[in-house]
Image (tube, rainbow, N blue to C red):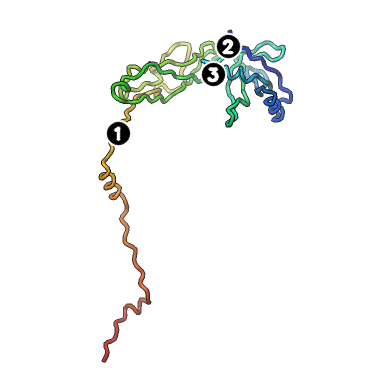
Protein backbone atom coordinates (compact mmCIF):
# COMPACT_ATOMS: atom_id res chain seq x y z
CA UNK A 1 0.00 0.00 0.00
CA UNK A 2 1.49 3.37 -1.03
CA UNK A 3 2.44 5.99 1.51
CA UNK A 4 -0.15 8.73 1.97
CA UNK A 5 1.21 12.24 2.44
CA UNK A 6 -1.46 14.50 3.94
CA UNK A 7 -0.84 18.04 2.72
CA UNK A 8 -2.44 21.35 3.59
CA UNK A 9 -2.87 24.31 1.22
CA UNK A 10 -0.38 27.04 2.04
CA UNK A 11 -1.67 30.47 3.05
CA UNK A 12 0.19 33.25 1.27
CA UNK A 13 1.05 31.14 -1.75
CA UNK A 14 4.71 31.40 -2.79
CA UNK A 15 5.93 34.30 -0.65
CA UNK A 16 9.06 33.99 1.50
CA UNK A 17 7.26 35.15 4.63
CA UNK A 18 4.62 32.44 4.18
CA UNK A 19 7.32 29.78 3.77
CA UNK A 20 9.06 31.01 6.92
CA UNK A 21 5.85 30.76 8.93
CA UNK A 22 5.37 27.19 7.72
CA UNK A 23 8.86 26.18 8.94
CA UNK A 24 8.30 27.87 12.31
CA UNK A 25 5.15 25.76 12.69
CA UNK A 26 7.21 22.59 12.14
CA UNK A 27 6.13 21.86 8.57
CA UNK A 28 7.92 22.06 5.19
CA UNK A 29 6.79 24.37 2.39
CA UNK A 30 6.26 22.41 -0.83
CA UNK A 31 4.98 22.78 -4.37
CA UNK A 32 2.89 20.19 -6.21
CA UNK A 33 2.79 20.50 -10.01
CA UNK A 34 2.60 18.50 -13.25
CA UNK A 35 0.11 16.33 -15.19
CA UNK A 36 -1.61 19.37 -16.67
CA UNK A 37 -2.49 20.92 -13.30
CA UNK A 38 -1.51 24.34 -12.00
CA UNK A 39 1.22 24.46 -9.37
CA UNK A 40 -0.19 24.37 -5.83
CA UNK A 41 1.58 25.72 -2.73
CA UNK A 42 1.24 23.23 0.13
CA UNK A 43 2.82 22.30 3.44
CA UNK A 44 3.79 18.76 4.45
CA UNK A 45 5.16 16.83 7.42
CA UNK A 46 9.01 16.67 7.34
CA UNK A 47 8.99 13.26 9.05
CA UNK A 48 6.94 11.73 6.25
CA UNK A 49 9.17 13.20 3.56
CA UNK A 50 12.34 12.06 5.33
CA UNK A 51 10.91 8.56 5.68
CA UNK A 52 10.31 8.47 1.93
CA UNK A 53 13.74 9.83 1.01
CA UNK A 54 15.51 7.28 3.22
CA UNK A 55 13.42 4.33 2.06
CA UNK A 56 14.68 1.64 -0.31
CA UNK A 57 13.23 3.40 -3.36
CA UNK A 58 14.22 6.88 -2.12
CA UNK A 59 13.18 9.84 -4.24
CA UNK A 60 11.74 7.44 -6.84
CA UNK A 61 9.02 6.36 -4.41
CA UNK A 62 5.49 6.83 -5.71
CA UNK A 63 3.00 7.92 -3.05
CA UNK A 64 -0.42 9.53 -2.67
CA UNK A 65 -0.84 13.20 -1.83
CA UNK A 66 -4.10 14.29 -0.22
CA UNK A 67 -4.84 18.02 -0.17
CA UNK A 68 -7.82 18.90 1.97
CA UNK A 69 -10.91 17.07 0.76
CA UNK A 70 -9.62 16.52 -2.78
CA UNK A 71 -9.01 13.09 -4.28
CA UNK A 72 -5.51 11.73 -3.72
CA UNK A 73 -2.96 12.34 -6.48
CA UNK A 74 -0.04 10.07 -7.35
CA UNK A 75 3.23 11.95 -6.92
CA UNK A 76 6.96 11.63 -6.38
CA UNK A 77 9.74 13.86 -5.05
CA UNK A 78 11.70 15.57 -7.82
CA UNK A 79 13.74 18.09 -5.83
CA UNK A 80 14.47 19.02 -2.23
CA UNK A 81 16.56 21.56 -0.34
CA UNK A 82 18.33 21.24 3.01
CA UNK A 83 19.59 23.86 5.41
CA UNK A 84 23.41 23.35 5.25
CA UNK A 85 24.24 23.88 8.94
CA UNK A 86 21.46 21.92 10.66
CA UNK A 87 20.88 19.61 7.64
CA UNK A 88 17.13 20.05 7.88
CA UNK A 89 14.68 19.88 4.98
CA UNK A 90 13.47 23.37 4.08
CA UNK A 91 11.64 22.89 0.75
CA UNK A 92 10.21 20.08 -1.39
CA UNK A 93 9.11 19.89 -5.02
CA UNK A 94 6.50 17.22 -5.76
CA UNK A 95 5.38 16.17 -9.23
CA UNK A 96 2.05 14.62 -10.15
CA UNK A 97 2.52 11.52 -12.28
CA UNK A 98 0.32 9.51 -14.61
CA UNK A 99 0.72 5.77 -14.17
CA UNK A 100 0.30 5.16 -17.91
CA UNK A 101 3.10 7.52 -19.01
CA UNK A 102 6.83 6.79 -18.95
CA UNK A 103 9.18 8.69 -16.67
CA UNK A 104 12.89 9.46 -16.80
CA UNK A 105 14.54 8.78 -13.46
CA UNK A 106 17.95 8.07 -11.91
CA UNK A 107 18.38 4.66 -10.30
CA UNK A 108 21.16 3.56 -7.94
CA UNK A 109 23.68 0.94 -9.12
CA UNK A 110 24.21 -1.82 -6.52
CA UNK A 111 27.30 -4.03 -6.81
CA UNK A 112 27.16 -7.70 -5.78
CA UNK A 113 30.20 -9.69 -4.65
CA UNK A 114 33.93 -8.93 -4.44
CA UNK A 115 35.96 -8.93 -7.69
CA UNK A 116 38.64 -11.61 -8.18
CA UNK A 117 41.00 -8.80 -9.17
CA UNK A 118 40.55 -7.25 -5.73
CA UNK A 119 40.93 -10.45 -3.70
CA UNK A 120 43.77 -12.06 -5.69
CA UNK A 121 45.54 -9.22 -7.53
CA UNK A 122 45.41 -6.35 -5.04
CA UNK A 123 43.28 -4.10 -7.24
CA UNK A 124 40.40 -1.86 -6.26
CA UNK A 125 36.87 -1.64 -7.63
CA UNK A 126 36.14 1.82 -9.03
CA UNK A 127 32.40 2.47 -9.38
CA UNK A 128 32.25 5.16 -12.06
CA UNK A 129 28.45 5.35 -12.44
CA UNK A 130 26.73 5.24 -9.07
CA UNK A 131 23.40 5.94 -10.77
CA UNK A 132 22.06 5.27 -14.25
CA UNK A 133 19.36 7.13 -16.14
CA UNK A 134 16.40 5.01 -17.22
CA UNK A 135 13.00 5.48 -18.82
CA UNK A 136 10.02 3.33 -17.85
CA UNK A 137 6.48 3.35 -16.52
CA UNK A 138 6.11 4.46 -12.88
CA UNK A 139 5.14 0.96 -11.73
CA UNK A 140 8.32 -0.51 -13.29
CA UNK A 141 10.86 1.78 -11.59
CA UNK A 142 13.38 -0.50 -9.82
CA UNK A 143 14.74 0.41 -6.40
CA UNK A 144 18.24 -0.27 -7.78
CA UNK A 145 20.08 -2.00 -10.63
CA UNK A 146 22.13 -5.05 -9.59
CA UNK A 147 25.53 -5.69 -11.17
CA UNK A 148 27.56 -8.80 -10.30
CA UNK A 149 31.26 -7.87 -10.05
CA UNK A 150 32.56 -11.09 -8.46
CA UNK A 151 34.10 -12.44 -11.71
CA UNK A 152 35.94 -9.23 -12.61
CA UNK A 153 39.71 -9.57 -12.93
CA UNK A 154 42.27 -6.76 -12.89
CA UNK A 155 41.50 -4.18 -15.62
CA UNK A 156 38.09 -5.75 -16.43
CA UNK A 157 35.32 -3.26 -17.27
CA UNK A 158 31.54 -3.43 -16.93
CA UNK A 159 29.63 -1.12 -19.24
CA UNK A 160 25.99 -0.06 -19.48
CA UNK A 161 25.50 -2.71 -22.17
CA UNK A 162 26.44 -5.37 -19.55
CA UNK A 163 23.69 -4.32 -17.10
CA UNK A 164 20.49 -6.40 -16.79
CA UNK A 165 18.18 -5.43 -19.65
CA UNK A 166 14.43 -5.96 -20.01
CA UNK A 167 11.62 -4.75 -22.22
CA UNK A 168 10.25 -2.72 -19.29
CA UNK A 169 13.15 -0.29 -18.86
CA UNK A 170 15.31 1.64 -21.30
CA UNK A 171 18.80 2.88 -20.39
CA UNK A 172 19.45 6.47 -21.42
CA UNK A 173 23.21 6.37 -20.78
CA UNK A 174 25.50 5.47 -23.68
CA UNK A 175 25.78 1.69 -24.05
CA UNK A 176 29.61 1.87 -23.96
CA UNK A 177 29.70 4.08 -20.83
CA UNK A 178 31.81 2.57 -18.04
CA UNK A 179 29.83 1.55 -14.96
CA UNK A 180 32.68 -0.06 -12.98
CA UNK A 181 36.23 -1.32 -13.52
CA UNK A 182 38.98 -2.94 -11.48
CA UNK A 183 42.15 -0.84 -11.43
CA UNK A 184 45.65 -1.38 -10.04
CA UNK A 185 46.93 0.69 -7.14
CA UNK A 186 50.54 -0.47 -7.45
CA UNK A 187 52.88 2.17 -8.84
CA UNK A 188 56.65 2.00 -9.23
CA UNK A 189 58.42 4.67 -7.22
CA UNK A 190 61.68 5.99 -8.66
CA UNK A 191 64.70 6.08 -6.31
CA UNK A 192 65.25 9.43 -4.62
CA UNK A 193 68.59 9.95 -6.41
CA UNK A 194 66.93 9.48 -9.81
CA UNK A 195 64.16 11.90 -8.90
CA UNK A 196 66.66 14.55 -7.82
CA UNK A 197 68.74 14.03 -10.96
CA UNK A 198 65.69 14.35 -13.17
CA UNK A 199 64.63 17.52 -11.37
CA UNK A 200 68.10 19.01 -11.76
CA UNK A 201 68.18 18.19 -15.47
CA UNK A 202 64.77 19.73 -15.99
CA UNK A 203 65.65 22.95 -14.14
CA UNK A 204 66.63 25.83 -16.48
CA UNK A 205 70.30 26.90 -16.40
CA UNK A 206 70.76 30.44 -15.15
CA UNK A 207 73.87 32.53 -15.53
CA UNK A 208 75.53 33.98 -12.46
CA UNK A 209 74.44 37.55 -11.85
CA UNK A 210 76.90 40.21 -12.86
CA UNK A 211 78.43 41.99 -9.87
CA UNK A 212 78.23 45.73 -10.21
CA UNK A 213 81.54 47.51 -9.61
CA UNK A 214 81.80 50.80 -7.84
CA UNK A 215 83.20 53.80 -9.61
CA UNK A 216 82.82 55.20 -13.09
CA UNK A 217 83.53 52.89 -16.02
CA UNK A 218 85.97 55.41 -17.53
CA UNK A 219 87.94 55.58 -14.30
CA UNK A 220 88.30 51.81 -14.20
CA UNK A 221 89.53 51.78 -17.80
CA UNK A 222 92.38 54.31 -17.15
CA UNK A 223 95.82 53.01 -16.15
CA UNK A 224 97.79 54.91 -13.58
CA UNK A 225 100.55 57.06 -15.17
CA UNK A 226 104.11 56.04 -14.41
CA UNK A 227 106.06 58.48 -12.32
CA UNK A 228 108.86 60.28 -14.18
- Residue 8: where, in percent of width, then height? 70, 18
Q: Which residue is mark 1?
A: 187
Tag on residue 99? 2
Is 105 on the left-hand or right-hand side of 14? left
- Are dots 3 and 2 in contact, CB under 8 Å? no
Q: Which mark is residue 54?
A: 3
Query: Which of 52/100 is in front?
Result: 52
Residue 9, located in which quarter of the rendered image? Answer: top right
Q: Tell me the residue at 63%/12% (across/down).
A: 4
Left or right for 165, reference 62: left
Q: Residue at x 57, y 17 (%)?
A: 52
- The residue lying at 35 percent from left, 76 percent from top is 217
- Quadrant in the rendering for residue 227: bottom left
Compared with 4, 153 (above or below) is below
- Which SS class for mark 3? loop
Dot 2: element = loop
Amino acid sequence: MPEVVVAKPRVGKFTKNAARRVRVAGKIPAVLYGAGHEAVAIEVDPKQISRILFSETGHNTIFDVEIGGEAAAKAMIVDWQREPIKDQLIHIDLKRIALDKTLRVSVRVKTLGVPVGVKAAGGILDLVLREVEIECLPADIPSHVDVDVSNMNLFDVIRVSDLPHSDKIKYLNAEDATVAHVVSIREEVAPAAEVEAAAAAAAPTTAEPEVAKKGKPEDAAKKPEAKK
